[in-house]
Structures are given as C-alpha cells and as structure tokens.
Amino acid sequence: MSPVHRNPTHRGTRRAPGRTLTRRHLLGLVGLAAVPAAIVGAQQFRSDDTAAEATTSPGRTAGTPASASAPPKVVTEGGGPVPFVPGKAMLGAYLSLSGKTATQSQALRRQQTGREERIVHVFYDWPDLLPTSIEGLPAQAVPMVSWRGTAYSDITSGASDELIARAARRLKSLGRPVLLRWGWEMNGDWYDWSPARNGKNPAGYIQSWRRMHDIFAKEGATNVAWVWSPNWNSSPIADWNTIAALYPGDKYVDWVGVSGYNLRRETPETLFSPIYRSYAARKPILITEVGSVDRGGRTKADWISLFARWVEGHPAVGGVAWFDTDTHPGYTEKWRVDTDAASLAAYVAMAKSARFSG
C-alpha cells in the first residue's frame, strides 16, 4: 500500500498471544484518516497506471502504461509445502470481527459465503511464541503466519538463533502445511526490518532471511512455505530499496506475496501488476493483504468485482488473503467485507467463482 500518508499517531490493536501489536505494526493503513475527505472524494478510479503512479511503483518507468508490456510467461508449479494449483486460487482472510471470537467469525463467513476460508491469516510479534494451534482453523485451511522482523544485526549476528529455532519447532508441530510471511513490506520505511532503518543495506535483509531459512531447514520444519511479501510500492524510492534488491533468491522463496489496498482509487492493475510481471514466470503469486475503502454507493462492491476480474486474468495468482476486520480502535474505516449488502454480494460472487475454488 502507498506509504505517502502514513500517520504514526493513529493506533490500534491486534493481539497475538502475550503481545499487543499496534495497527501501524500490523500493517501500514494508518494514513487514510489524515487525507482531507474532499481530496479523497474527488478522485476517480485511475485508468490502470498514470505517470504519477508510475514513479512510485516498483520496477516501472514513469509514463509507461501497463499495457505496453507483453503478458509474461507464468509458473505452472511451485509453492513448496503449500502447492500452487494452476487455474485455482485459495481465498481467505485476516479475519477479526468486533464482538466475535475467531470461531464465531469463521462461522459467520461460512454462513454468508457458503464455503470455508482456505487461508487463515494471523499476526505475531518477533519475540512471541508462534502458534502450535490456531483457533477456528477450518480443516482444509492453510494458516498464514505473518511474523514481524527485527533489526538485521539481531539475526545475522546469531543472537536470535535459538528464538528462530524455537519458532521453527512450533510451526513444525502444527503438523500441516503453513505459509510463513516473515518481515513483510520490507521495502517501506515504517518497520524495523526495512533497509531504511538498517543502514540502507538490502543485503542485510537477504542475509537475515537466508539464515532463518537455513535454521528452519535444520530443525526439519519442512511443512513451512516461505512467503516473501513486499509492499506494492517502495518508500523511499532508491536503488537500495527496490523490490529486486530485497529478493532473497529463488532457492529461499516459495511464494511471492504483495500488499495493496484501494485507498485512493488505485486499480488492481496499479497495485499488483508490476510485481506480477516481475515474478510470475518464477514463483506463484499470493495477494497477502488487500482491502478497499468504501466511498458510498457501489464503490466498494465495484472494486471487489474489479479485483476478481483482475485475478481471473492473472493465472499465476494462487491465493488471496483479504483484510477482513473492524476491530482497530482509532481508525474509522471498516475493512470487513460485509459493510453493506452490495459489497458482501460482490465478495460472495468472487468466493463462489471457479477461479477461487482452490
């Protein structure tokens, strides 16, 4: 998501065992409230890619339209312990609904959509005990554990080796395939594990990732699929902070993820196509965080339908995790999919489509 309007004074909570995470720690959605309503309301859906957006999108030359690129070759296999199935996309969410337990929230979505979540997204802080069980997890669902990072030196020095090994043992004990999304949105400047906060040194991120990967392998955590998940655009824009500069290498990545939100009428093409074009020939793509602002009328419903059509046209996308929640105090936008009947209907239509039968 765009970091341009981030506001660190907005705070919210998402609780992992023994740890409270601020909304800014969870993801970078804090800035929308800082944008004047008149400015937001005056904007329209952007036609795929404008020159202004091109300057902030990774790997894009200003003024070059997305349609100028030929469709890339795409993967037909991959995903590691969570295998990619061509033509099918898993659909799930970070699901946290006010007044409901995780089990109750899953039951509501099952009743509304007529199906189970296929991805259950949960967040943990760096020192937390990672889960050995997850409340409300449907039998056929894949957990996606987003695990916060730390300063590179805490990892590359070896000081955190036992903490990492403990995490590997705990995820191994889940006894089922799991997606591990460590150190997400590393190309933004809002997290401690960004190169912007580590001496502008992307190599330190790669070294940290590879060391963790090797420790998990040593612990026999062969059920863990590694999800490398940058933000849709980089902040700051610099050679040392490009998505490509932060890629750990094909040997160390099972899925390429991406975060992108419709905050200011960005289209799915704007948010997700640059990284798709860069990696779809090498790795399956996972939309790890996505949601849409509701500006009244059918604006949210129409964007959900637009997103569903984008996924239909991009066969390397093997999974989507919606940001489906209304539990963050201090932030007025409700990201849950059923804020109105039209939005829920659009989401249900997507959930029931053959493309999302993975």
Image (spheres, rainbow, N blue to C red):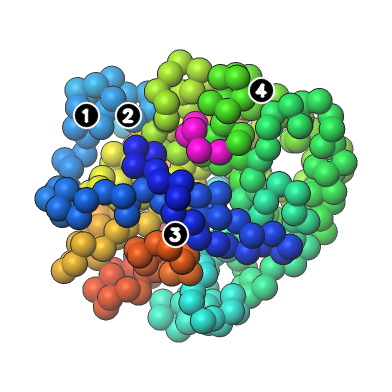
Q: CA distance from mark 4 to mark 2?
A: 23 Å
Element at badge 2? loop
Q: Are marks 3 and 4 in contact (CB under 8 Å)?
A: no
Q: Are marks 2 and 3 in contact (CB under 8 Å)?
A: no
Q: Which residue is mark 1?
A: 52
Residue 56, numbered circle: 2
- Find out whether residue 190 is within the magenta segment: yes
**Which numbered disc flags the more N-terminal residue, 4 or 1?**
1
| Residue 15 horizontal/vertical position (percent) | 63, 64
**Which numbered disc flags the more N-terminal residue, 4 or 2?**
2
The front one of 87 and 318 is: 318
| Residue 308 horizontal/vertical position (percent) | 32, 57
Q: Which residue is mark 4?
A: 204
Q: Which residues are magenta?
A: 187-191
Q: Which residue is mark 3?
A: 322
Q: CA distance from mark 2 to mark 3?
A: 23 Å
> Please, what is the three-letter code of the amino acid marked with disc 3?
Trp
| Residue 30 horizontal/vertical position (percent) | 41, 51
